[in-house]
Image: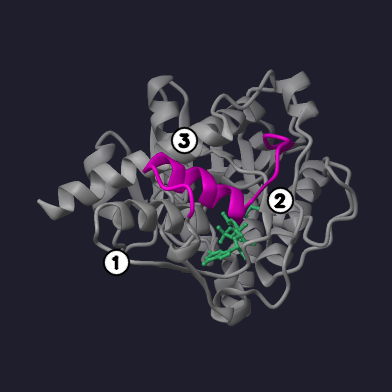
Amino acid sequence: MPTALITGITGQDGLYLAELLLSKKYEVYGLIRGQNNPKLDLVRNTLPEVKLITGDLTDVASLVRVLEISNPDEIYNLGAISFVAYSWENASLTSDVTGKGVLNILEATRLFAGDDIEKVRFYQASSSEMFGKVQAVPQTESTLLWPRSPYGVAKTFGHYMTINYRESYGMHASSGILFNHESPRRGPEFVTRKISQSVARIHLGLQSEIILGNLDAKRDWGFAGDYVDAMWRMLQQPQGDDYVVSTGEAHSIKEFLNEAFAVVGISDWSKYVKQDSKFMRPAEVDLLIGNATKAKEVLGWEPKVSFSELVQMMVESDVAQQQDLKT
Ligand code: G4F
């Protein structure tokens, strides 16, 4: 039975990945940051088979201890401060966790594995946010990185560190450059879930409007459940490498609104949507769209859920959830 350690187990991707690995008969350990984590009960209730260990990406010694306890064959580093807008207000903390945290777990792995470093396989959750002010459309593994947020800069550091450990120590280290991926488990601070939850509440008469920022920004949105499968496939390859994971389709926030309101039978949503500059960003990334040809050819990976199906899944889930809360 292979063993996997997942950092960021309480997040959307952590849960989907743990489910996938458990279905493949892995023993799964999850790193948690100890006290007062509001999502801990969610993991305990949804996936009681996952073994939780306390540690912190900013503390190398704690990571070495976690590796000694879990003795993993595969490490999935999904832990990060992942809300881009927050990273301008907390740039230093974001750099410590999202950037230097990657170095810490790579170094802890090197210390833990010693001469057996090639036996431990490592996945780094890199991000399309690294492309920022895009230098080519669509973006591939070799497109120049030009991050536009402290979060993007931190992810870029983690991406290059992962490559560096692969090249310096022969580590089986892969970097998945994942474009936006969403689901009913997405946090409500992200725009897709903010919209799906608000549309559900408007439909049920619980809310009158949604206040958003830039409606023209475009994203390449896929389904998180599909994307964790790409992570696993990367670690089954003979060598570590970098892969773009995306749908190859970009849609604007306005298109997301069209689809979401259509699910509850509303075609003209203009009276429900307001804009406020507080949701605008100091620097925006306007056209993220990925070319996942390499993932398709090497990993045999393709997205299964379409944009319309994703929006429908999210709105229907939120309608059901809001109805439950009402009763
Ligand atoms: O949903 P978002 O906050 O996601 P963002 O910034 O693209 O980041 C997500 O995807 C990245 C992959 O590229 C991940 F690395 C990252 O961790 C995260 O998962 O914002 C999407 C777009 C932005 O252009 C933003 O300006 O939506 C626009 N937007 C418009 N109104 C809004 C809002 N975003 C949020 N969060 N809230 C709004 O009211």
The residue singled out by tag 3 in the image is: 17
Q: Which residues are magenta?
A: 244-268
Please rate how many residues cluster around mark 3, counting C-alpha atoms within 10 Å: few if below 14, some from 14 to 19, many from 20.
Answer: many
The residue singled out by tag 2 in the image is: 128
Inspect the image, locate mark 3, and give the three-letter code of the amino acid beneath it.
Answer: Leu
Q: What secondary structure is marked by label 1?
A: loop
Q: Position of residue 26 (x, y in %)?
A: 42, 25
Ligand 1 closer than 8 Å to label 2 CB = yes
Query: Observer-nearest residue: 192 or 293?
Result: 192
Q: Quadrant of residue 104?
A: bottom right
Residue 71 visible? The answer is no
CA gap between label 2 and label 1 equals 31 Å
Q: Nearer the viewer, mark 1 or mark 3?
A: 3
Inspect the image, locate mark 2, and give the three-letter code of the amino acid beneath it.
Answer: Ser
Query: Mark 2 and 3 residues: CB-CB less than 8 Å, in contact?
Result: no
Q: Tell me what residue is drawn at x 32 percent, y 47 percent.
A: 318
The residue singled out by tag 1 in the image is: 35
